[in-house]
Amino acid sequence: MHTKQKAFGLLLLFMLSGVQVMTQDLTEEQKKLLEQSQETHEFQAETGRLMDILINSLYTQKEIFLRELISNAADALDKIRFLSVKNPEILGDKTELAIRIEINTEEKTVSVTDSGIGMSKNDLISNLGTIAKSGTTQFIEAIKGGNVNLIGQFGVGFYSCFLAGQKVTVASKNTDDDQYIWESQAAHSFAVSKDPRGNTLGRGTQVTIHLKQDAVEFAEESTIKELIKKYSEFINFPIYLKVTREVSKQVEEEPEQQQDQQENTDDDEVKVKDDDDDADTNKKATKTIKEKVSEWVQINENKAIWLRPKEEISDDDYKKFYKVLSKNSGEDPFNWVHFKAEGEVEFTSLIYVPKRAPSDMFDNYYGKQTTNLKLYVRRVLISEEFEDILPRYLSFVKGVIDSDELPLNVNRETLQQLKMLKVISRKIVKKILELFQDAASYDDEDEEDTEEGEEDDNMAETTPEEQQRLKDEKRKKKIDEYNEFWKEYGKNIKLGVIEDSSNRQKLAELTRWYSSKNATELTSFDDYIERAKPGQDSIYYLAGENKEQLLASPIIQGLLKKGYEVLLLEDPVDEFTFQHLNEYKQKKLINVGKGDFKQPEDNDEQRKKQKALKKVFQPLTDWWRKLLSETVDSVIISQRLIDDPIIVVSSESGYSANMERISKAQAYSSKAGSQQFGKKIVEINPNHQAIQELLQRVKDDPDQETEEMAKVLYEAALVNSGYSIPNPEKFASRFYKLFNSALGIDRDAPVKEFEVEIEEEPEASSEPPQSDDGTKWEKVNTDDAKWETVSNDKRDDL
């Protein structure tokens, strides 16, 4: 393995240290001298093959080469800056520490130049033959714990150049040696020679990529500018790009042009001129031309705000950076959190919560997801396409993560498997949930503590009533702000309860629901518990299509009459959320739409009465269960019905009405019938006269009409309880027969054609009606027998 590892670090070091490549600038004589002085070195055994594997598998995007070159250039600048602290003279005349990028569209090359520490000939030879051995690693070992952060500690980043380049030429000047050139085509050898041009760099490195045919897009200014902004926008050192633009310029016309113009004038023209005209002839003629000029433009003008102490950053600074990060110049964020994590892994993060949710957030929720978090290693963007750095229910969060401990020169697929990335993910989720909890909670004591210094004097001057009014206003404002957040991201929080078991209780505290107490305002679990009746150990809920239907449901009328509050779940995901949550702060979550629901306040006297009623109505319940045996598991006496004669609920293991409706609406739902959803439970109201009449008819030997009534009553209850009728056509047929009976008509009376006497229309008359007063008539329609009088105006016209 040691043999295979000796080639990659070489190229990285010259890059990290500052190397220059510009063989296209050499004269023919210099090229000959270069060829004569070149020392050709073979890569060690199998290095060429290993290099090809690493180049094509370690990186998946060609554009990465520019990120790596800029990162390595920044390392070289960091080195010289670190050394100049103790020895300022090492900078010499070249005090500017910057990175400059130049494009040659004709030669199809890209050059990256830095004024860093540079490399000597021995440095190039000793390092370029060893894979994963870079000058940066050696430098860090040499300073033994000095406070310097350098990016390229893995010795492979430079080789990404060969993704886009067919040849790479590097020139480097170290303060302790002459300027040397290194050149390779990623084959089995590289050449090192003294630069025949002499010391053209002064100090530093320039790397030139000779682009492949399929990578010529990197020879365009717009492409390079976009890549700099994407990957290296927050590098500490200024990055300049040489750009070309057209300018207008006034120049003098050539004497020959002026003479030609004079000869073209008319010979017969009168040439009498005064002294002023003579003076005008002495003026030189000018013209406007377009000229291309080149200039250096700094691309990375934004600063890495997350690396500054929080105390030095104002809210306006945070908001401005959010607009840069999100490419949104409109709305401010809902909130943000800025923190530095220490312990297992150290990193700094700045997380924003947008005010509005993306419109396509759930279009492909369970497909391949990418977060809006950008991962940086020492201000260099590594990736913005990580799938697992945050759980998918938090995919709307935007921000940056910057760590000094993550490896830079690996692809995102490998990085995602790193244990430290999972630690980062866990800590970020914790901070985001704390941010949500702060937005969702309102503690009067905390509020007073945070604003005590600001408002003590003002509060002292107000009455207790006024102080309470101000507190109420602040509380309402914060509640309204969180309710707006909930409208945007409530579904995400619910999905988090379902998917994130480790944070389920924290997420449950953030949830908001409508309830029977107030169907227009949201409430929390904590508020529900605070309003609960003494001794109530459960939280009751019912799921359905909308709040209005749920409030009118006969299922909850008994609870409401006794003063119990029921949460109303109208979102399709709500019932799934409650099923995964199961309980909240030791309060059991009870679905009142299930058959196993036990009415609260069930004392001994009520149980005795229930037992007696069961015995009395047993003939009806047994008969009815047998009649509906295909779909009904049992018929029982209800304790919760008030005005309705019957309701239908699901068994403990069966689908509730809401879950059955959702399941049937799925594109790939089964067509096996109602049996897949479980049999139903029928609850009857012993106090309703219709149920009492049915009991009497069953005791007197039920006839066919009684059976029809029982079936129609059951199917009507299905609809009223939120279920769908299995066979609507049979229900309609039975209903029409019972309707006939109610009207005193034979229930099976046949349909007869209704006979109607048709009056004959008079034949159309070709003559108008006769009138003694001289009235004139006209026909309404040529095919009609109708005539009408002619108006006065029309008569005059006629």
Image (tube, grey):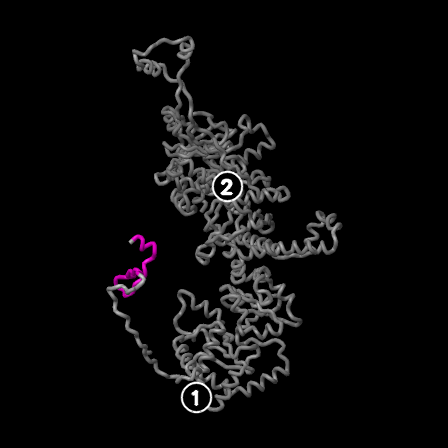
Dot 2 or dot 1, earlier in sequence: 2
Q: Quick check: 640 above or below 415?
A: below
Q: Residue at x 61, y 54 (%)?
A: 439
**In the rendered image, which quarter is residue 79 located in?**
top right
Percent position of residue 756, x then y: 32, 77
Q: Amino acid at mark 1?
A: Asp
Q: Decide if residue 465 is on the left or right side of residue 795.
A: right
Q: Amino acid at mark 2?
A: Gly
Q: Residue furthest left?
A: 766
Q: Which residue is mark 1?
A: 703
Q: Is residue 785 magenta?
A: yes
Q: Which mark is residue 660?
A: none
Most foreground residue, 14 or 218 = 218
Count of numbered marks: 2
Q: Is residue 688 magenta?
A: no
Distance from the alpha carbon under mark 2 to that under mark 1: 91 Å
Which residue range is magenta in the image?
A: 774-797
Q: Is residue 405 visible?
A: no
Label 2 environment density (alpha carbons within 10 Å; few <14, some 14–19, many ≥20): many
Q: Quick check: 523 above or below 404?
A: below
SS type, badge 1: loop
Q: Are marks 2 and 1 in contact (CB under 8 Å)?
A: no
Q: Which mark is residue 152?
A: 2
Q: Quadrant of the C terminus?
A: bottom left
**In the rendered image, which quarter is residue 242 located in?**
top left
Percent position of residue 294, x then y: 44, 28
Percent position of residue 178, x then y: 48, 27
Q: Residue furthest bottom?
A: 700
